Image: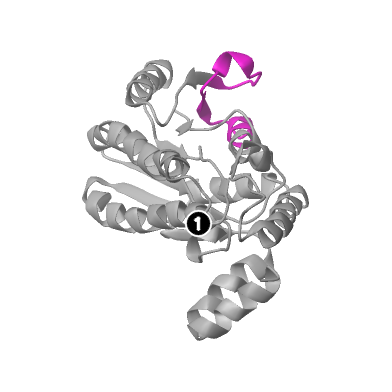
Amino acid sequence: MSKTVFITGASSGIGKSIAMYLYNKGYAVVGTSRNPNKVEVPFQMVALDVTNQETIRTAIAEAIEKVGKIDVLINNAGKGITGPIEDTPTDEMKENFNTNFFGVIDVIKEVLPYMREQKGGLIINTTSIAAYMGLPFRGIYSASKGALELVTEALSMEVKQFGINVVNVAPGDFATNIAAGRYHTPVFENSAYKEKYAENLALMDTHVDSGADPIIMAKAIHQIIGNKTPKIHYKVGGFMEKFSIVLKRILPDKVYEKLLMNHYKL
């Protein structure tokens, strides 16, 4: 019997690329979207909003009914957010954490009892290269993804006894529509950060538009699923994106900060 995969946020971008790739490799795929009826894909889709626990319960139950089990959970659904910390509404910060952090945890909580019962499973959390460093004007996004990286480490140790593996996959910039779905704090006329934030907002969108093909991420996920003893942390991106994490480990804080500030023209 082929492995079954449940993936959140499968209607577009990286999630859709992963779901399509695994489907074409013979996996039984169930994807999710808040509005699955608007999505035309060959794999099965169910309705799920990671900020709504009732839809999570219903979607997981529906997926089990459709494919019988969940061997692999891929928490891909996420939301971007940009803005100076001082200017960004706190409610928007909380909403970002509800999607990128608490929503992921709620999906995991719902799937774990099924995986324990079947005595095994794999949970893959999509984080970000940005999770490894506090990036200017993306601090809340970095924080939500960084928090997920750490929770994954803890969860990995807690569920190992049940034959369940938990891993993070941190992508760099990929050519997707994530920029369109971000919450962008407005460039306020009276903001102390107006000029620098406006410059960096354009720079961020350029990075996404010129990003790599999401199929690279799909292939990486496929390899991880095929690994019987996966690592906890994976990074998928360009050389400099991954090397930036290495530099943070070996350089003094102030030197690394200066490099980032030069990059972002601060």
* Dot 1 crowding, Cα within 10 Å, few <14, some 14–19, many 20+: some
Q: Is residue 188 visible?
A: yes
Q: Determine if the magenta segment contains residue 92.
A: no
Q: Quadrant of the C terminus?
A: bottom right
Q: Is residue 121 left or right of residue 254?
A: left
Residue 15 point in image, percent of width and height: 58, 37
Q: Where is 225 relative to 46, above or below?
A: below
Residue visible at 53% across and 52% down? 87
Q: Quadrant of the N terminus?
A: top left
From what the image shows, is residue 65 above or below residue 211? above
Q: Nearer the viewer, residue 191 or 142?
A: 191
* Residue position marked by numbered label 1 in the rendering: 85
Location of residue 54 (image quadrant) = top left
Q: Secondary structure at mark 1?
A: loop
- Could you say which is closer to the camera, residue 266 or residue 119? 266
Residue 6 position, x and y percent, is: 46, 31
Q: Residue furthest front?
A: 190
Residue 185 percent across, percent down from the top left: 59, 45
Q: Is residue 24 above or below residue 170?
A: above
Label 1 amino acid? Ile
Q: Position of residue 180 (x, y in %)?
A: 67, 37
Residue 226 seen in render: no
* Image: magenta residue range: 19-44
Q: What residue is drawn where x is 28% and y is 57%? A: 154
Residue 40 part of the magenta segment:
yes
